[in-house]
Amino acid sequence: EPEVTQTPSHQVTQMGQEVILRCVPISNHLYFYWYRQILGQKVEFLVSFYNNEISEKSEIFDDQFSVERPDGSNFTLKIRSTKLEDSAMYFCASNKAKGSRNEKLFFGSGTQLSVL
Amino acid sequence: QKEVEQDPGPLSVPEGAIVSLNCTYSNSAFQYFMWYRQYSRKGPELLMYTYSSGNKEDGRFTAQVDKSSKYISLFIRDSQPSDSATYLCAMIFPGYSTLTFGKGTMLLVSP
């Protein structure tokens, strides 16, 4: 089965540093997402991306966050100046079609971000 | 008011047991309901998807939705040790693509 690939699996950074989390969505998918899960908390939506622009974003996704699809395959999440509370597992996801039926959303295995 | 509530567990059962996992929600605008399974250090994996009240069956799994009570359930028959994971309910508003997740229930099936 096709997979969403995320790198690195674990990222440790100092508070205030910039981090870039990388994802390779499934090749024929058109919609891309970032979710995060703070330890012991719910999986939370951050942002969705389609046709090279953000289509939806949550309150969490403030000016410190940005997303990019720099080429035809990668999808990145950048955090400009990390804070301690950004420590979480970040999941990338993709699917073929948006919509109320939210066709099967494929998640990657996540990047565990630890901000020290 | 929290939108989606789920008992975190852990729920421990012996192999072969019938498992019942539940979620309640507060916003009646949710129209589409999913159950995801999440193994340790992995991303969520879609198990079941439904959009109408009633039951939907897929192998050993049955998803049940009661929109009038704002209550959804996942039943697992003949549970296996490989079913040990965290089960997340998730919901979506019509016209949107973002999921609202419950906190997840950890299930442990012992051989």
Image (cartoon, coloured by chain):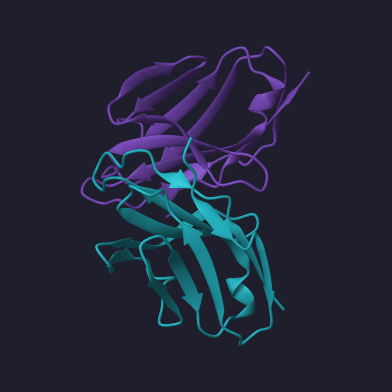
Chain colours: A cyan, B purple
- Percent coordinates x, y for residue A13 in the rendering: 68, 78
Q: Quadrant of the N terminus of chain B?
A: bottom left
Please state the total of marks drawn on the protein image. Answer: 0
- Percent coordinates x, y for residue A61 in the rendering: 41, 72
- Percent coordinates x, y for residue A20 in the rendering: 53, 74
Q: Is residue B100 left or right of residue A56?
A: right
Residue B2 visible in image:
no
Q: Residue at x 51, y 84 (%)?
A: A80
Above or below — where is A66 with respect to B2?
below
Above or below — where is B8 with respect to A31?
above
Q: Is residue B83 left or right of residue B48?
A: right
Above or below — where is B95 with respect to B78?
below
Above or below — where is B56 with respect to A79?
above
Residue A99 visible in image:
yes
Give the quarter of the image for residue B76.
Answer: top right
Q: Is residue B110 left or right of residue B101?
A: right
Which sits in the foreground, A107 or A75?
Answer: A75
- Percent coordinates x, y for residue B75 in the rendering: 52, 20
The single residue placed furthest to the front in the displayed view is: A72
Give the quarter of the image for residue A6.
Answer: bottom right
Which sits in the foreground, A113 or A28?
Answer: A28
Which sits in the foreground, B94 or A103?
Answer: A103
Q: Quadrant of the C terminus of chain B?
A: top right
The single residue placed furthest to the left in the displayed view is: B95
Q: Residue at x 48, y 48 (%)?
A: A107
Q: Is residue B65 left or right of residue A107?
A: left
